[in-house]
Image (cartoon, rainbow, N blue to C red):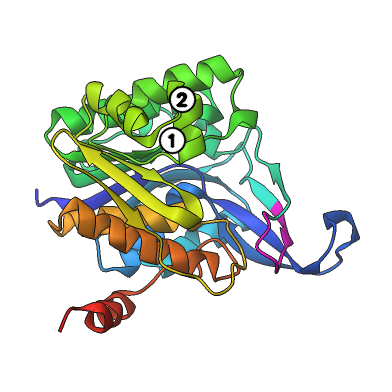
Amino acid sequence: MSKFDVLSFGETMAMWVAEHCGDLDQVELFHKRIAGADSNVAIGLARLGFNVKWLSRVGNDSLGRFVRNTLQAEGLDCQHVAIDPQHPTGFQLKSRVDDGNDPQVEYFRRGSAASHLGLDAITPQLLDARHLHATGIPPALSASCNELSFELMKSMRKAGNSVSFDPNLRPSLWASEQQMIRDINALAAHADWVLPGLSEGRLLTGYDDPGDIAAFYLDQGAEAVIIKLGAKGAYWRTAELEQFVPAVPVARVIDTVGAGDGFAVGVISALLENLDFAEAVQRGNWVGSRAVQSRGDMEGLPTRAELTHHNAQTAPE
């Protein structure tokens, strides 16, 4: 069987986005989109031409059909998206912001169809991916999703395929901070490329300095650790090399949601194209800069043509 490029998994929710600024309880008009960090990355990689399979679960309801149709329209292979006859598709409300502050988000996902994903979703075909991208969100959804996350990461690493992991901490989804830290660090031990934000790395490792945070995960077996530093850029480290890569300047920040997902798209796509870590982090910074200048979680994710145009503009003469 020929390998496909990327497997990603998790929960895609329907999202109702406010049409105008203000508190959610005062907003009367919303428009419907999809949301989910894991599927944002999957969509970003598909837009760049990668063959991406999406493993998930939706309810047998209109929101589930909307989610599935939207993902398919973005080029994802959704044959492994199960339809759950008993549990609903999760959704969220998101406020509109135009000033760069974090929007208000309210989640309605407890007991959702995706939270009932488990080990029975794994098939030999899924493990034939060149690369697995995972985040710390699915293992927080339920005990069965937690098991699934560990098994997929262990199996892919054992098969010799590359694995990336973004901690993407969601403390409100975990039973305790202690369990979150324990499980996230245990999952990171099965990843080749670990992509925490600086504040996440500090919480997870107890270290303040990016170099020490990176060393913590390198000692666990990672090939590379790439730490997001927000508006300052990013820092990466391997066993032999380390480098700070400054951010791409942005004239105006509109919406910060999805910036980390965009960064992951840039880094992972470049590494799958056999670029070096410095080039991968530069691409990550560029995609992240597009994300913060767009309203919405995935609107700023580039197509392959846009990436090619950017590369031509920034290539040394």
Helix, strand or loop at disc 2? helix
Let me know if residue 95 is in the magenta part: yes
289 drawn magenta:
no
Work out whether residue 134 or residue 54 is closer to the camera in this orientation and state it.
Answer: 134
**Label 1, label 2: how far apart the Cα atoms are:** 9 Å
Q: What residue type is labelled 1?
A: Pro
Q: Residue 241 carries which label?
A: none
Mark number, residue 167:
1
**Residue 296 lies in quadrant:** bottom right
Q: Where is residue 194 in the image (x, y as percent from the top left)?
A: 32, 37
**Mark 1 burial class by Cα count in 10 Å: few <14, some 14-19, many 20+:** many
Q: Which residue lies furthest to the right in this view?
A: 26
Q: Residue at x 66, y 49 (%)?
A: 91
State the mark number for residue 204: 2
Give amino acid for label 2: Leu
Q: Looking at the image, which residue is at 9% across and 52% down?
A: 2
Decide if residue 77 is in sight here. no
Tell me the element at label 1: loop
Residue 102 visible in rendering? yes
> Number of marks in the image?
2
> Residue 93 appears in which quarter of the rendering?
bottom right
Of residues 188 and 285, the one nearer the viewer is 285
From the image, which quarter does the C terminus lie in? bottom left
Question: In the rendered structure, which segment of residues is drawn in magenta?
Answer: 93-102
Asked if 285 appears above or below 277 in the picture, the reply is below
Task: Pick whichever, 289 or 307, lies toward us.
Answer: 289
Lower sequence index among marks 1 and 2: 1
Density class for disc 2 (Cα within 10 Å; few <14, some 14-19, many ≥20) is: many
Question: Does the CB distance between marks 1 and 2 fall below 8 Å?
Answer: yes
